[in-house]
């Protein structure tokens, strides 16, 4: 089976729960505080590994205790961390998350994730093979993302670019990725003044736009489809997109079609958001199989 190589961020999430989001200049008393494992790269790696995939992570953490804990967590999830580097000049990345009024707001401090730069990535590219499938997000420098996509394109390696958090991407990079998976907000930034329908029609079987509870929209080359999400009552939607991306790729490497891989991703994400923390609710394959919505045809090896 193909190996999944996730190149991206690994961070500590500092999560505060409060009933009301504070206004500028306001101080209020919240309900709870926890630190959890996060970073879009690590989250997507964990999502895929829990579903039984062979996952290698490329990233960077600091030489602090947060970095130790992140590496221990990835090892515990059976992820190959031989290229999760320790950098001495930057602290481990962090995300400062406020859960309030049924939604989250996040401030990301990249820290060591910015150490995933050209100098670090160049010698590691040769460790990625043609049989691999590569997932990358945007919590590492944009230049690194471009280097990875160029390399993979030249070596016919499949790529998924999850363009989160939102930032501009060169058109040539979009052309080179195999799949691009923005949410609605990221879609609007990447394709200004374009309707969803027009954007999807431009990139059939490549552009998959996640629509929260509504599911995922894409164009299959003939028509636009919406693959509906599963109706659940969310506890914490942090990492919904990461779970979707990790699970979608697991579907692909298990020979599911794009549409079935999206359904598989939607189900994994809907299970994940019923528990606290980005990684807290990410399902194992056994948990997926326990869902009433699990399809018999998804019988993985
Ligand atoms: P996040 O930033 O919170 O990780 P996102 O904004 O990147 O998420 P979304 O489009 O909100 O991405 O969600 C990704 C996927 O997660 C959706 O396509 C869907 O499958 C699932 N999902 C998200 N929210 C819900 C929900 N309320 N109910 C069911 N499924 C959901
Ligand atoms: O996608 C969710 C992740 O984004 C969180 O775990 C947090 O680390 C932020 O970067």
Image: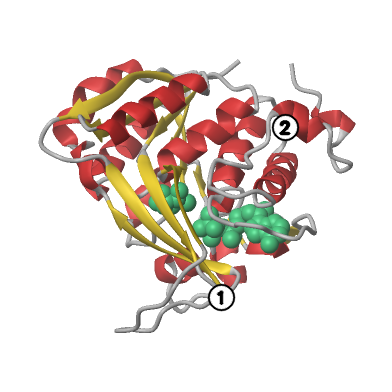
Give the quarter the ligand 1 occupies.
bottom right
Residue 117 % position (x, y): 19, 38
In the image, taking residue 82 as reference, residue 226 lies left or right, namely: right
Q: How is the image coloured?
A: secondary structure
Residue 97 visible in the displayed image: yes
Residue 282 % position (x, y): 62, 39
Residue 148 vs residue 95, the one in the foreground: 95
Image height of 288 relative to 162, above or below? above
Residue 153 vs residue 289, the one in the foreground: 289
Are there few (<14), some (14-19), or many (20+) residues within 10 Å of tag 2?
Answer: many
Circle on res. 74: none
Image height of 218 relative to 118, above or below? below
Assign the C terminus to one quadrant of the image. Answer: top right
Are there few (<14), some (14-19), or many (20+) residues within 10 Å of tag 1?
Answer: few
Residue 113 % position (x, y): 26, 41
In the image, what residue occupies the spot 54% across and 55% down?
Answer: 238
In the image, taking residue 40 as reference, residue 293 lies left or right, namely: right
Question: Which residue position is annotated with label 2?
Answer: 256
Residue 97 vs residue 46, the one in the foreground: 97
Residue 210 vs residue 129, the one in the foreground: 210
The quadrant where residue 90 appears: top left
Instruction: Say what secondary structure mark 1 lies in.
Output: loop
In the image, taking residue 115 as reference, residue 232 lies left or right, namely: right
Q: Nearer the viewer, mark 1 or mark 2?
A: 2
Instruction: Say what secondary structure mark 2 lies in.
Output: loop
Q: CA distance from mark 1 to mark 2?
A: 29 Å
Disc 2 within 8 angstroms of ligand 1 (CB): no
In the image, what residue occupies the spot 78% across and 55% down?
Answer: 230
Question: Which residue position is annotated with label 1?
Answer: 195
In the image, what residue occupies the spot 52% across and 32% down?
Answer: 46
| First-in-chain label (1 vs 2) | 1
């Amino acid at each position: 089976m193909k190996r999944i190589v996730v190149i991206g961020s690994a961070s500590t999430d500092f999560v505060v729960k409060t009933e009301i989001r504070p206004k500028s200049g306001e101080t209020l008393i919240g309900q709870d505080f926890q630190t959890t494992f996060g970073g879009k790269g690590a989250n997507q790696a964990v999502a895929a590994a829990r579903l039984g995939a062979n996952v290698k992570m490329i990233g960077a953490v600091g030489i602090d205790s947060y970095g130790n804990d992140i590496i221990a967590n990835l090892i515990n999830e059976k992820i190959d961390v031989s290229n999760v580097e320790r950098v001495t000049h930057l602290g481990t990345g962090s995300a400062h998350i406020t859960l309030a009024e049924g939604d989250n707001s996040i401030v990301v401090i990249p820290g060591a994730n910015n150490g995933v730069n050209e100098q670090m990535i160049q010698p590691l590219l040769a460790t990625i093979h043609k049989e691999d499938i590569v997932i990358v997000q945007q919590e590492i420098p944009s230049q690194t993302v471009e280097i990875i996509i160029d390399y993979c394109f030249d070596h016919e390696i499949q790529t998924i670019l999850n363009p989160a958090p939102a930032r501009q991407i060169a058109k040539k990079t979009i052309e080179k990725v195999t799949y691009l998976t923005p949410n609605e907000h990221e879609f609007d930034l990447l394709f200004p003044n374009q309707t969803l329908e027009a954007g999807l029609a431009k990139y059939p079987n490549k552009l998959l736009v996640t629509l929260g509870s509504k599911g995922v929209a894409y164009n299959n080359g003939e028509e636009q489809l919406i693959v509906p999400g599963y109706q659940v009552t969310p506890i914490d939607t942090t990492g919904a997109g990461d779970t979707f991306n990790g699970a979608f790729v697991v579907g692909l490497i298990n020979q599911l079609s794009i549409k079935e891989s999206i359904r598989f991703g939607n189900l994994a994400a809907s299970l994940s958001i019923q528990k606290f923390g980005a990684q807290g609710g990410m399902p194992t394959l056994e948990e997926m199989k326990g869902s009433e919505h699990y399809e018999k045809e998804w019988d993985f090896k």
